[in-house]
Image: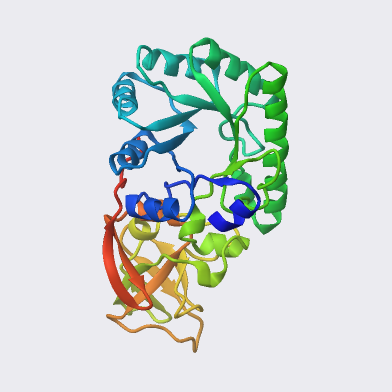
Amino acid sequence: MASAVADRGIALRPHTKTHKSVSLARIQLDAGARGVTVGTLGEAEVMAGGGIDDIFIAYPLWVDEGKAGRLRALLERDGLELAIGVDSTAGAERLARATGGLRRRPCVLIEADPGNRRTGVAAEEAAAVARAATNAGLEVRGVFVHGGHAYGGADAIAGAARDEVETLAAAVDALFAAGLPARVVSAGSSPTALGAAREPVNEVRPGTYLLGDRQQVALGASPPNGVAICVAATVVSTTVAGQIVIDAGAKALTKDLPPYLAGYGTMPAYPAGIIERVSDYHGVVTFPDGAARPSLGDIVAVVPNHACPVVDLYDSFIATRSGSTTGRWPVDARGRSG
């Protein structure tokens, strides 16, 4: 990914919410990433604590009293470059009040909505939010979007990437007309990362691409052999004909189930099996007649539908290469969702 976007003259700022790991962020930075993206103040604290000094919180923080103290402590770290997303005048003003009087204050990026209908203002309203941030004493670094509607299916990706580019272009024009800069023009999602890597975009923020998952494969955003994550599960019951039960249920695989996937994960060694239902600690896998299936006590690899929430359920990764274990890496930001 770093090489592909660099060839287009685009900076890579990967979203670490996928892996929540300082070790994996370091690998991304060593490969050419320009800083990292996080989704929460807690994730920012962990990455900064791990020595990463260029962080973008791509989220419209509402800075309450508790978050204000934590944010100020983060900004007082020597050498840390911190940017924060805003999508409202009130949010920008509150952020400015919370960081007033500091030697170094956060930069902000204005979030515009490319059709995801989650957070972000209409592109033409970005200038008003940027003006409010500027008037409150904050430096506006640029604009950003998240094309999350790409996850609607493989046929939605090209349109979502186009929406990201067009929305960012309109937001940049709105800021320019208001006499405001937009040095960073940032798009973000793994499915649209390369499709949106064109002018005026100069930064992309994919996250899941690093690990891959079943959803990324289904969307065509990752090749089947590009998935680098699985959950190790044990077959704990075979009492019902035509099915097995594994010890990976909702608290191991989550309940993410996109409409274009059958089951809550897939077992590459037993592709005919469908993880048909999950309860807290049980995954019920059904098989058609005659299909190969594992036996009681066997350990099977399960590729999850969506890697990001699955990673947050575990304390560590077991890192392997060519079938051999190379180490165990902590999920440093596990549970740091606030």
Across and down, in percent, residue 201 comes to 65, 40
Across and down, in percent, residue 34 comes to 49, 44
Quadrant where the N terminus lies?
bottom right
Across and down, in percent, residue 51 comes to 31, 42
Q: Is residue 54 above or below residue 296?
A: above
The residue positioned farthest toward the bottom in the image shown: 290
**Identity of the residue drawn at 46% across and 56% down:** 31
Q: Is residue 229 above or below residue 119?
A: below
Across and down, in percent, residue 156 comes to 69, 52
Work out whether residue 164 can be spotted.
yes
**Identity of the residue drawn at 47% across and 58% down:** 210
**Identity of the residue drawn at 46% across and 30% down:** 83
Quadrant where the C terminus lies?
top left
Q: Is residue 167 left or right of residue 50?
A: right
Q: Is residue 213 above or below residue 172?
A: below
Number of numbered labels in the structure image: 0
Q: Which color scheme does this rendered protein use?
A: rainbow
Residue sitting nearer the eye, 199 or 64 = 199
**Identity of the residue drawn at 45% across and 42% down:** 35
Q: Is residue 187 left or right of residue 47?
A: right
Q: Quadrant of residue 45?
A: top left
Q: Quadrant of residue 52?
A: top left
Q: Is residue 209 left or right of residue 38?
A: right
Residue sitting nearer the eye, 66 or 200 = 200
Work out whether residue 1 can be spotted.
no
Q: Is residue 247 above or below residue 74?
A: below
